Image (spheres, rainbow, N blue to C red):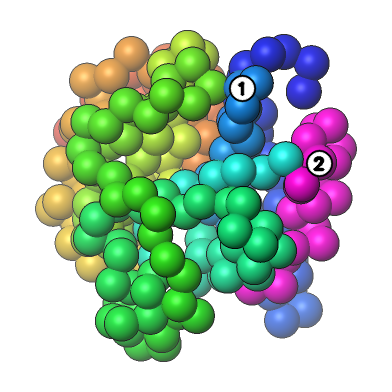
Amino acid sequence: MAAREGIQTIKLEMDAGGSPFVVHTAVLWDEQEVVLIDTGLAGQLPLIRDTLAKADIPLEKLTKIIITHQDRDHIGSLFELVSYGEGRIQVLAHEVAIPYLAGETALLKSGAFATPVKVDQALHDGDILPYAGGIQVIYTPGHSPDHISLYHIPSKTLISGDALTAEDGVLLSFNPDFTPDRAAAVQSIAKLAKLDIGSVIAYHGGVCTKDIKGRLAELAETTPA
C-alpha cells in the first residue's frame, strides 16, 4: 500500500465444503480509509486478514465494507468482520439491501436469514463516495434487486459484483442460473456500457482489460433476457 490512494484486486481462495471456491474483489484506500468490497463465504476472517496482509494492508486499518448484494458468498463473513472491528468498521449497501442485511427479510435465493448487521450508510444510484479518489455507485439490479456495481473513477476500474462474470480474461455476461430478473440484468449491462471503463473486476472470474467498452456493448446486445 505504497501509494497514498489506490485500488488492488483481492483474490480469495476459499473452501466450500471441501471444494475450492475462488472469488475476486477489491480493496481501496486513501490516507484515512481502507474499504473492502464484499466478504466472501462465512468463516473467512483469517483468510481475508492474511490476503490483506499480503497487500501490506493490516486488517486493523479496515474502516469500511461495501456490499454489492445480499448473496451468501458476498455477505458470509460480514458479521464476523464487523464484530472484529468493534465499532470501527462501517457497512455500506444499497437501500434495498438493508432489510436483508438486518436479518428482517429472508435472503432471496437461500431463504435463510442473515446474521443481523447494521447498515451505516444506505447507497443510491449515482452516489459518489469520497474514498480512494472517488467511487461511483451504479445500481445494477437483475442478479438481485439490491445489486450495485462500483466504479473507481481515478483508475477507471469497475467492480462488477455478479452483474458480469469472466473466464480467462474474457468478460462475460451474468450467470443466468442465478439471475432471477434477466431483463433487468441485461439493462444493467447496457447501463455499464455507457461508462468509460478500462478494467473490470468480476467477482466470479477475475480481471478483464481488453476492449471493455466494446465487449459491454456486445454483451448488452447479445445476452438473452
The relative height of residue 171 versus residue 96 in the rendered view (above or below) is above
Question: Where is residue 119 shown, x and y percent of the image?
Answer: 39, 59
Q: Which residue is mark 1?
A: 30
Q: Residue at x 23, y 60 (%)?
A: 96
The kind of residue on which mark 2 rests is: Pro
Looking at the figure, which quarter contains the N terminus? top right
The kind of residue on which mark 1 rests is: Asp
Residue 17 inside the magenta-drawn segment: no
Q: Which residue is mark 2?
A: 58
Residue 49 inside the magenta-drawn segment: yes
**Foreground of the two, 210 or 5:** 5
Q: Residue at x 72, y 40 (%)?
A: 61
| Residue 3 seen by the camera | yes
**Residue closest to the far bottom:** 112
Q: Residue at x 67, y 44 (%)?
A: 62
| Residue 205 seen by the camera | no
Q: Secondary structure at mark 2?
A: loop
Span highlighted in magenta in the image: 40-60
The relative height of residue 93 versus residue 212 in the rendered view (above or below) is below
